[in-house]
C-alpha cells in the first residue's frame, strides 16, 4: 500500500516541456523551443504565440523574447516573429486537424491537451443568442505548462490536518500565478493517498475542476496524480459541481479552485451544511483584501474557514506568507 510521501519517492515530476507540448507546436516553433537551454526550460510557465509578434516564453519572474536560434533576449528586434502558418499549424495539431472537435471547449477560451497542459486561445468570438459559440480568426495562443510538483503541500498539511485526523476547512488566498493550483493539487493527492508519518489514512476527495487545471483531464482522464480515492468533475461550474459531487460520490472533502461568485458561495455553504469539508482558493493579496469584498467578506465573518493560507511570489512561486487560524488577531483586524 502506497502512502503519499512514499509515492512521491517513486514518481518523477513530469518533464516541464514534454513531447505533449512540443508535438502541439508548429514545426518551426517546435525547433526553436528545442534549442532553448535545458536549465531555462525548467522554469518555463507559458509559451506565447501572437500573430505577427515576437515569440515569447514566461518564467515565474519575467517574459523573454525568443530568437530563431533559441536564445532568450530582452530585445524584441532579435526575436522570431510568429507567422500565420505557425498559428494555423499549431491549431491543427492541438485539434488533431479537426477544429470542430474542440469547439465546445473553445467556448471557454481554452482547451486541454495530453499531459494536462492548458492552451488559451484569443481571436474573434462568434456569438449566437447571447452566448459565445466558438472562436475564429485566431490571433494568439498561450500554452500554460502544467507543473505537477509532488510534495508541494508538505509544509501546509500539518496545519490542515488536526490531531484527531480531521481536515480543516481551508481557504488559500493568492495573487495570480503564485502556486495556489499546484498547492491544491498536491493537497488532494496527499489527502487521497494518506500520510504514514502522521498515521493519516486516505480519505475520499471530490475535485470540482471547472477550468480543467487541477486534474488536467484529457478525454475524461486526469493527467495529474490526485490519488486513488479522488473523483473529478471536469469542466463543471463550481456552483453545480459541488452539490453534484455530494449527491453522487459522497466525498469527505471537496477541493475546488477560485471561488468568487454568489452562487459559488451559496453552494459552498450547502457543502458545509452537509458535513463535508471544503478546501478552496480565491484571488487576493491577503486576508484583509478578501474581507473587503462583499460576498467573500460575509463568508469570512461567518467563521466558516478554520485556516487561511496566504501565498505570494516574494521568495519565488508558492511562497507561504502566513497560515492564519480562525479567530486570531490577524483574522480579526
Image (cartoon, helix red, strand yellow):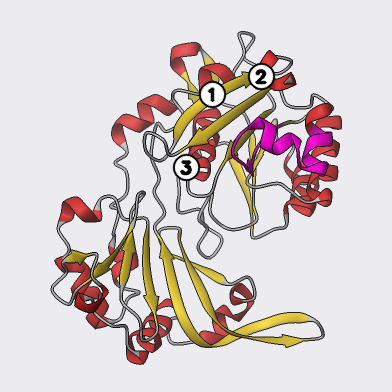
Disc 1: which residue:
322
Instruction: Give the Cα distance between marks 3 and 2.
Output: 23 Å
Disc 2: which residue:
330
Residue 43 lies in the magenta-colored region: no
Q: Is residue 40 left or right of residue 134?
A: left
Residue at the image position 17 percent from the left and 50 percent from the top: 39
Q: Percent position (x, y) of residue 182?
A: 47, 42
Residue 289 lies in the magenta-colored region: yes
N-terminal label among 3 and 2: 3
Instruction: Give the Cα distance between marks 2 and 1.
Output: 10 Å
Marks 2 and 1 in Cβ contact (< 8 Å) = yes
Check the picture and name the quadrant holding the C terminus: top right
Q: Percent position (x, y) of residue 214?
A: 54, 49
Foreground mark, 3 or 2, reads 2
Q: Is residue 219 left or right of residue 263?
A: left
Q: Percent position (x, y) of residue 273?
A: 86, 31
N-terminal label among 3 and 1: 3
Task: Choose between 12 and 65: the one closer to the eye.
Answer: 65
Check the picture and name the quadrant holding the N terminus: top left
Residue at the image position 14 percent from the left and 67 percent from the top: 35
Disc 3: which residue:
179
Quadrant of the rendered image containing residue 6: top left
Mark 1 closeness class: few <14, some 14–19, many ≥20 residues within 10 Å: some
Q: Is residue 269 left or right of residue 94?
A: right
Residue at the image position 73 percent from the left and 48 percent from the top: 260
What is the magenta range? 278-299
Q: Secondary structure at mark 2?
A: helix
Task: Choose between 105 and 322: the one closer to the eye.
Answer: 322
Residue at the image position 47 percent from the left and 84 percent from the top: 139
Name above or below for residue 138 compared with residue 113: below
Amino acid at each position: 500500500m502506497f502512502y503519499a510521501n512514499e509515492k512521491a519517492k517513486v514518481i518523477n515530476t513530469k518533464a516541464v516541456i514534454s513531447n505533449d507540448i512540443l508535438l502541439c507546436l508548429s514545426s518551426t516553433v517546435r525547433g526553436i523551443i528545442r534549442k532553448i537551454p535545458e536549465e531555462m526550460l525548467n522554469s518555463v510557465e507559458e509559451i506565447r504565440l501572437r500573430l505577427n509578434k515576437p515569440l515569447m516564453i514566461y518564467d515565474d519572474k519575467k517574459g523573454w523574447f525568443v530568437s530563431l536560434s533559441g536564445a532568450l533576449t530582452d530585445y524584441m528586434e532579435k526575436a522570431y516573429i510568429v507567422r500565420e502558418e505557425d498559428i494555423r499549424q499549431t491549431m491543427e495539431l492541438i485539434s488533431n486537424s479537426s477544429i470542430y472537435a474542440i469547439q465546445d471547449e473553445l467556448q471557454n477560451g481554452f482547451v486541454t491537451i495530453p499531459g494536462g497542459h492548458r492552451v488559451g486561445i484569443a481571436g474573434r468570438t462568434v456569438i449566437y443568442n447571447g452566448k459565445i459559440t466558438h472562436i475564429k480568426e485566431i490571433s494568439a495562443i498561450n500554452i500554460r505548462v502544467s507543473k505537477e510538483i509532488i510534495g508541494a503541500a508538505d509544509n501546509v498539511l500539518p496545519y490542515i490536518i488536526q490531531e484527531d485526523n480531521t481536515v480543516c476547512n481551508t481557504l488559500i488566498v493568492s495573487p495570480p500565478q503564485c502556486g495556489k493550483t499546484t498547492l491544491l493539487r498536491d493537497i488532494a493527492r496527499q489527502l487521497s493517498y494518506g500520510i504514514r508519518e502522521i498515521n493519516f489514512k486516505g480519505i475520499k476527495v471530490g475535485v470540482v475542476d471547472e477550468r480543467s487545471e487541477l486534474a488536467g483531464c484529457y478525454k475524461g482522464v486526469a493527467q495529474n496524480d490526485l490519488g486513488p480515492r479522488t473523483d473529478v468533475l471536469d469542466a463543471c461550474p463550481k456552483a453545480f459541481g459541488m452539490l453534484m459531487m455530494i449527491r453522487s460520490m459522497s466525498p469527505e472533502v471537496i477541493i475546488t479552485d477560485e471561488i468568487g461568485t454568489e452562487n459559488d458561495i451559496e453552494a459552498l455553504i450547502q457543502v458545509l451544511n452537509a458535513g463535508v469539508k471544503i478546501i478552496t482558493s480565491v484571488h487576493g493579496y491577503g486576508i484583509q483584501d478578501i474581507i473587503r469584498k462583499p460576498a467573500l467578506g460575509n463568508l469570512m465573518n461567518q467563521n466558516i474557514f478554520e485556516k487561511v493560507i496566504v501565498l505570494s511570489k516574494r521568495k519565488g512561486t508558492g511562497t507561504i506568507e502566513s497560515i492564519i487560524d480562525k479567530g486570531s488577531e490577524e483574522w480579526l483586524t
